[in-house]
Image (tube, rainbow, N blue to C red):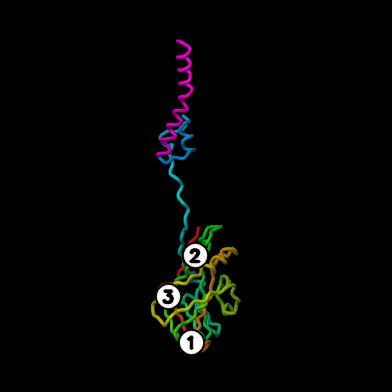
């Protein structure tokens, strides 16, 4: 064999693995494989037929629906009489309602995108053209009692409901309230609902909000 042929043969043998590697990489790229998977394909100790893996799914926002906790939900009359598992009622006469949702369904470190509390099967009356509903975060704990209406709330969101309605579904944006509670490590999202009836202020004839038993409020939280 002459020197030229010997050098050409030697060069071809030296380049063969590199050519094969480039060819496999090109095929893998076309199939959507990752470089790490291609590296496995070049190792005879791995199954060449499974070199390609599916790209990890995008985390994206997740969503969870939280129902109220019957044992903690109810309303308290001005006299201090507590009503549990009887739906929710509020009046300008001083009756206020309370609702709790279990936040432990959210994973640690969850970042809240938005949160909505839906009052299903709602009915209300107004003394004027609208009724104001105040939703306040109130840490009333593991038992609803007569002193809870007097607890100072952490934060309050005010919502305006239109003319009186029967059997309506009311969606309230409580994103800021939920975010604040999650950031502070709360295991329960607990709120107090007060309704105020237009120009009659705190008069007995003011607004009145009620929520039926059949369809309890739901808290929907989007997070990632």
Nearer to the camera, 132 or 146: 132
> Alpha-carbon distance for marks 2 and 1?
32 Å
Judge the density around disc 2: few (<14), some (14-19), many (≥20) Cα neighbours within 10 Å. Answer: some
Residue 213 tag number: 3
Residue 48: x percent and y percent? 42, 33
Residue extending furthest left? 167
Nearer to the camera, 128 or 207: 128
**Contact flag, marks 2 and 3 (Cβ < 8 Å):** no
**Residue at the (46%, 61%) spot, across then down:** 63
Q: Which residue is mark 1?
A: 206
Residue 68: x percent and y percent? 48, 69
Q: Which residue is mark 2?
A: 114
> Alpha-carbon distance for marks 2 and 3?
26 Å
Assess whether residue 203 is covered by the magenta stretch: no
Where disc 2 sits, the SS reads strand
Height in image: 120 above or below 221?
below
Judge the density around disc 1: few (<14), some (14-19), many (≥20) Cα neighbours within 10 Å. Answer: many
Upstream in the sequence, badge 2 or badge 3?
Answer: 2
Residue 173: x percent and y percent? 48, 70
**Residue at the (45%, 87%) spot, across then down:** 128
Magenta segment range? 1-30
Q: Nearer the viewer, mark 2 or mark 1?
A: 2
Residue 46 tag number: none
Q: Nearer the viewer, mark 2 or mark 3?
A: 2
- Magenta-colored segment: predominant secondary structure: helix
Residue 126: x percent and y percent? 45, 85
């Amino acid at each position: 064999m002459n020197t030229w042929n010997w050098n050409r043969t030697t060069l071809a043998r030296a380049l063969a693995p590199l050519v094969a590697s480039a060819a496999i990489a090109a095929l893998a790229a076309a199939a959507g494989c990752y470089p790490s998977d291609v590296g496995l394909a070049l190792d005879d100790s791995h199954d060449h037929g499974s070199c390609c893996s599916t790209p990890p799914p995008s985390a994206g926002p997740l969503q969870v629906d939280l129902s109220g906790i019957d044992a903690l939900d109810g309303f308290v009359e001005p006299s201090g009489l507590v009503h549990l598992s009887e739906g929710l009622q509020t009046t300008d006469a001083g009756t206020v309602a309370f609702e709790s949702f279990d936040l432990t369904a959210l994973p640690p470190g969850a970042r809240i995108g938005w949160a909505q509390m839906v009052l299903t099967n709602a009915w209300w009356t107004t003394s004027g053209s609208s009724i104001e509903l105040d939703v306040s975060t109130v840490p009333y704990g593991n038992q609803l009692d007569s002193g809870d209406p007097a607890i100072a709330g952490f934060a309050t969101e005010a919502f305006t409901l239109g003319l009186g309605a029967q059997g309506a579904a009311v969606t309230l944006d409580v994103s800021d309230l939920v975010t604040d509670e999650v950031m502070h490590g709360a295991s329960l999202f607990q709120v107090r609902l007060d309704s105020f009836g237009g120009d009659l202020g705190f008069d007995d004839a003011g607004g009145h909000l009620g929520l039926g038993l059949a369809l309890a409020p739901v808290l929907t939280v989007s997070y990632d």
